[in-house]
Amino acid sequence: MYKSFDIDNGVVEMNHGGGGRAMRKLIDELFIYYLNNEWLAQGNDGAVVPSHRGNLVITTDAHVVSPLFFPGGDIGSLAVYGTVNDLAVMGAIPYYLAAGFIIEEGFPLAQLARIVESMAHAANRAQIKLVAGDTKIVERGKGDGLFITTTGCGFVAEGIHLSGDQARPGDVVLLSGAIGAHGLAILTQRDPSIFTAPIYSDSAPLNDLTSAMLMSGAELRLMRDPTRGGLAATLNEIAQQSHVGIFLNEESIPIPPEVNAACELLGIDPLNIANEGKLVAICAPNDAEKLLSIMRQHPLGQQAMIIGKVVTDENYFVRMQTLFGGQRMVDWLFGEQLPRIC
Amino acid sequence: MKYVDEFRNGRIARQIAQIIASETQTGRYYRLMEFCGGHTHTLSRYGIADLLPANIRMIHGPGCPVCVLPIGWINLAIDLSLKKNVILCTYADTLRIPAAWSLSLSRIKAQGADIRVIYSVDNALEIARANPNCEVVFFAIGFETTTPPTAVAILQAAASNLNNFSVLCCHVLTPPAIQHILDAPDIRIDGVIGPGHVSTVIGLQAYEFCATQYQQPVVITGFEPLDIMQAILMLIRQINGQRAIVENEYTRAVTRAGNQKASELIKRVFEIRENFEWRGLGVLPNSAWQIRPSFAQYDAEQRFNLKYQPGVDHKGCECGAILRGLKHPRDCKLFARGCVPENPLGACMVSSEGACAAHYLYGRYRDV
């Protein structure tokens, strides 16, 4: 099938985006080959897809991660999970995905194929259909290999209103699992020489976990996935939106030893590191234990913990009881931004 | 994590806190200065103040290399990076230091200057080798800890005839800054927590003048929270016992003589500068290094004929008084109003080791 199209040794050329036969070949023999479904096969300018019960939820996410491949994942799986998880934490069931690829001239076709195949696996795992796509080629030096944007659609049941402004004093803050591995898996690839044992990204689709949490009947106020800026940024966003404070207990925040060790070496705070495949949930105090036990029954929530509570604070500060015994604020990330981790 | 968690053990911290509380004398006030910004950061990050009795006050000293670097040097670095064919290599922290005309290296970089953030001076040598047609300048800042690697880089450049590499040398010395604080008539401190990493190089002996000339208790300590708790206890005991000696809490890293090889490397390449301006402390004699004439071709000041001009700090900025321990960050009108980590107006808000940034990030909830 690939004889006319050297996937092993070929590279992306400008004419792959020119609208001619070469572009058609790239789409048919690479994208549709891996991602095929009834909507893509129609080859129309848009996908006409069935509606579902509830309200439509739309989200979009641009992925510029560097490097493109990292232990435990790549830009392809990340582009799927990133968008799926944004839908999931809104309480939606993700159904459809559209993807835009901006590819730099000279990008190896073999790598592109690996990435698209990985997207197909990820979409399959998350049970979402990739129904529309676009490809653009930019001249050498005008891009950085490959950027992928994904837009996702899902439906949220009537009566579910999860929103960042719903946290109330007294509510309980839960975290679905250990933090930091995903961001560090990418960061440590920048200089692999100093990290002899790789840290693996734990990126994963959260929609199955969020479904279980929604079905538990617990009074959920909101869910959010702590990506860029880490747990610290997510909790500060919630505090600002809900006009509350949040008080954490450091002892209860699960951080893997290898994450702690790498953070120590790099001089960064695990609370500032991006995650993909973890969520923060805030729920009414009486339902916290029930929700925790539902989360722990799910493979992606086995290490779930109650990490703190929502408090009254007119400055909307996030504070933490440290392991050491004192208190401190948990502020937004500042200093050198950790570049391009998603 | 082995060899780290042991030094962050909350149970042991509470035990030391109890001993400190029982040994501090009521009615007596203990003003302890942690010289080093790394210690300031640890104090804030672990909320150590919550574990100390009210009559112990920690005063944040000037040991943050970014904070004490005056505007004039940033202006020089900016001028250099605007020259044609110059690549300026720098540690990330200097990028956001505010300079003249609301500029910073970060702003100049965004406008197109070739400024590269590096993690080690080795990276600057690599960049110089890879760009033989460019002048590569390493903006060298820091205390005795970062000075030996700069010396090694200059020696390596000389050994390999790397002729497009030079150093804008702003390396400073710790003891003269401590001496300045101890000499200042308006600053009262009862004990000094001495720097850890710096002392691995210069050793305990470098602080003996504090005890002998100034009768000032000194404890050299590490950067983990238990190190600092232990150092505070050791200082309280010296003060109560009216002793003034240099003690070593950081025995796992620091010796009396220090790292002699590193000290020799420094002296091979550098000599003492007659005068150097420090932000907040003014011009201090014999307080910084300059590159020896025999390595003049690696000295960016010589190579580009640079002349140092003092700059003017932001009006209303209290960094000077804060660096000398006379004021607390919350006493500054700009703190958390105009001056925030995202847009620092004064240098103490730039590095997370700066007193203002550490307080902003970890402790400002205490002010409200």
Image (cartoon, rainbow, N blue to C red):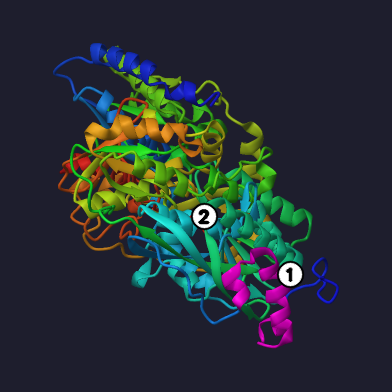
Labels 2 and 1 share a subunit: no
Query: Which one is nearer the viewer's eye here, A153 or B128?
Result: A153
| Residue position for label 1 | B132
Query: Residue at image x 44%, y 20%?
Result: B247
Residue B69 rendering spot, x and y as whole percentages: 42, 54
Query: Which of the two discs, 2 and 1, sits closer to the camera?
Result: 2
Q: Say which quarter of the image contains residue A93.
A: bottom left
Q: Identify the chain of the residue marked 1, using the numbered disc in the image.
A: B
Residue A35 drawn in magenta: yes
Q: Look at the image and tell me in which quarter the N terminus of chain A lies.
A: bottom right
Whether residue B33 can be seen here: no
Residue A25 in magenta stretch: yes
Magenta span: predominant SS is helix
Q: Residue A81 carries which label?
A: 2
Mark 2 → mark 1, Cα distance in angstroms: 44 Å
Amino acid type at image mark 1? Pro
- The vertical placement of B301 against A127, above or below, is below
Which stretch is magenta?
A13-42
Residue B116 horizontal side relative to residue B46, left or right: right
Between B221 and B267, the one lying in front of the other is B221
Question: Which chain does the residue under circle 2 lie in?
Answer: A
